[in-house]
Each structure stands twice: as C-alpha cells, then as structure tokens.
Image (tube, rainbow, N blue to C red):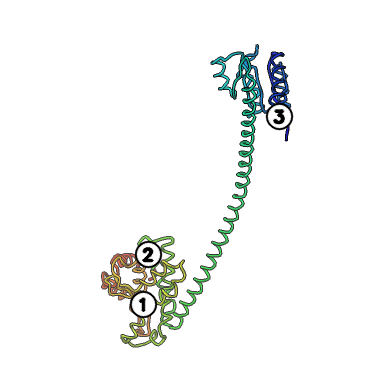
Amino acid sequence: MSAAPALLLLIDETEMARYLKEELLIEGGYPVFHETDVAAAVSAFRNNPFPLIIIKLDMPGTVMGDLIRVFREIDQDCIIIGFLNEADPRMMRDGIKSGVYDFIFKPVNMERLIFLVKKGLELRHIMTLHRQLLNDIQEHNHSLYKQNNILARRIEESTKNMVKLYEDLRSTYMRTIKVLAHTIEAKDKYTRKHSENVASYAAVIAKEMGLSGEELEKLIEACELHDLGKIGVEDVILSKPAGLTPAEWEQIKLHPNTAVEILEPLTFLEDVTKLVKQHHEHYDGSGYPEGRSGDDILLGARIIHLADAYDAMRSARSYRKIPLTKEETVEEIKKNSGKQFDPKVVEAFLRVVDKVDF
C-alpha cells in the first residue's frame, strides 16, 4: 500500500501547527510539511507541488486572493483548505471565488478536517486523472488529425488515379465505338464521312441556339455514333439502289434501338445514348422508333435530325446518284418545318446556312 501524500501546512501559529501536524499524522496518516513564512512556503511548493494545502487565510500582512493565486499559478489543480479564526462570511465568499475548496475554524474539529483532507485528495486524484485524460485525448486527436491528413492525401491521390483511369477507359471505349461506327460507314462509299459531316453541321446549329460546354460535347459525340445501330442492318439493304420493301424499311427503323443496346451498358454515355435513340423522331410525331413529337424530343436530337437529313440530301446515295443542290436542300427543309423538323431548329439553320461551309 502506497504512503499517504505529504500535505503543506501554512500557518503562523506554532502551537496550532504542531497540534494539526500530530493529529493529521496520527489520526489520518498524512505527513505534513509546515511553514510559517509565505515566501518559504511558496518556494517549497514550487520545488514539490503538494496535492493539498491548509492555509491560514487571515495571516497578518497577506492578501488572501493574491496568496491563493500564487499557489494556483504553480499548480492549478491543488486543493486548498482555508483556516480562519472564525466563520467570516465575507472572507469565506471571497475565498470560494478565489478557489478555496472548504474551510475550518477554531476550535478545529479534527474529524471534519481529516474528512475534508480525504475528500479533497480524492477530488485532486479525479482532477489529475481528468487532466491526463484530456491530454491523452488531445494527443490522440492530434495523432488522428495527422493520420486523417495522410489519409486525405492518399484518398486524393487515389481519386486522381481513379479519375485518370476512368478517363482512359472512357477514351478507349469511345475510340473503339467510333472505329466501329466509321467501319460501318466505310462499307458504303456513299456514306463515308457522313457522321463527321453531321457533327460539323449540328455543332454550328447548336452554337447558334446557345448550346455550349458539356451539352455541345455530348451532341457531337451523339452525331459521331448516331448510325452505330446500322451494324444490325444487312449490307444489301444499306446499299440497295432501288426503293426498300416494307420489311426492309422496318429493319432500317430498328437501327436506333440497336445502337441503344450497344451503348446502354456504357453508363457514362447515358445522355449521348438518348440523343442517338431519338435522332429519327419527327417534330409532328411521324418519326421512329417511339413516335415522339414536339418538345418531347430532346433538343439535341432535333438538331441532329436536321443535320443528318441535310447531309443525306446533299450527298450521293445508292438510291440517288445525284445529290440535291444546297438551294434545293434548303427549300426541302423549309417545306418540312413544323412537320419533320422543329421550326426553331430550322430558323437557326437558316441563319447560319450561308455563313459557314454547309
């Protein structure tokens, strides 16, 4: 069993000090270090911070608040029991404000004093543990802060790597799909560079209508992939020089949905896929594959549809060896405004058709 901690007794009355020292040691088992001089007591406390001090608060030539403050500055957790000749309400009130734990008075009740010392030391122990816990928590929090910073940097680096990997994969997929789309076009000498032309025309119209940034980028990608679904159409149908039979025409009308089946697993192309699916819808609802009409058709799809039709009319095809002139094509588009084409898209087209190389 560990020995009881020593107490500091600061009192100017030698006989009272001797009595308290003996009784605290005999009855409570507490060794006591006694001083009658304030400066000597402060020096002793500074060299060996005692857990508990019994101070004569009304010693001549001392200011109670200043005296207590000196000890508190050395050890803010020290327990101070005030000793007064008599119960003085004013001094007790000031003592409590200064941090006095409790008071004893003449004649000293040793049983109560030993009880106060015991409870005071228990409080001191709890305060010490509490402060140690706070310090441990602060150190732990500091360690966590450092670890969190390290983790945050690693997450940031991992995120950058994942973004780069995602962009690389996206780029690889896009190159593969575009190669596939261009391969389909290359099978027919009449449709070579068709998607490239559609993208060029659609971009000019879209900019005229205020599209920009990511929206414009998706539109261009949709143009490059809009005929991807023709991979499911027989070559003899795509290159047939005469008119198509109803059955052949139904097969042609499947190509937007076929493109969706190819592109749908690529979630990063979700918006592009919707544009590809709707690029053959007519403003009056007579198009395919869903018969959408008006604003129920995505604006980008309405723009692609006009650009697609313009390039088709301006190019030679297996079923039409001589393409329409620019003037004839413009008149055809005007005639179908509000029917096949969105009037607003037609207006934008007419504003730019003579300003750029259409």
Vertical comparison of 294 with 81: above or below? below
Q: Earlier in the sequence, mark 3 or mark 2?
A: 3
Q: Tell which residue pokes out farthest to the top in this image.
A: 60
Helix, strand or loop at label 3? It is: loop
Looking at the image, which residue is at 61% across and 38% down?
134
Q: Nearer the viewer, residue 96 or 215?
A: 96
- Tally of numbered tags: 3
Left or right: residue 100 versus residue 275 is right
Q: CA distance from mark 3 to mark 1?
A: 101 Å
Displayed quadrant of residue 330: bottom left
Q: Residues within 10 Å of mark 1 (few under 14, many from 20)?
A: some
Q: Residues within 10 Å of mark 3 (few under 14, many from 20)?
A: some
| Residue for badge 1 | 312
| Residue for badge 2 | 206
Q: Which three-letter amino acid code belongs to the residue tagged 2?
A: Ala
Labels 2 and 1 touching (C-beta < 8 A): no
What label does residue 5 carry, if any?
Answer: 3
Vertical comparison of 87 with 129: above or below? above
Q: Earlier in the sequence, mark 3 or mark 1?
A: 3
Labels 3 and 2 touching (C-beta < 8 A): no
Q: Which three-letter amino acid code belongs to the residue tagged 1?
A: Ala
Q: Quadrant of the C terminus?
A: bottom left
Helix, strand or loop at label 2? It is: helix
- Observer-side mark, 3 or 1, equals 3
Q: Which three-letter amino acid code belongs to the residue tagged 3?
A: Pro
Vertical comparison of 78 with 324: above or below? above
Q: Residues within 10 Å of mark 2 (few under 14, many from 20)?
A: many
Q: CA distance from mark 3 to mark 2?
A: 87 Å
Q: CA distance from mark 2 to mark 1?
A: 19 Å
Helix, strand or loop at label 1? It is: helix
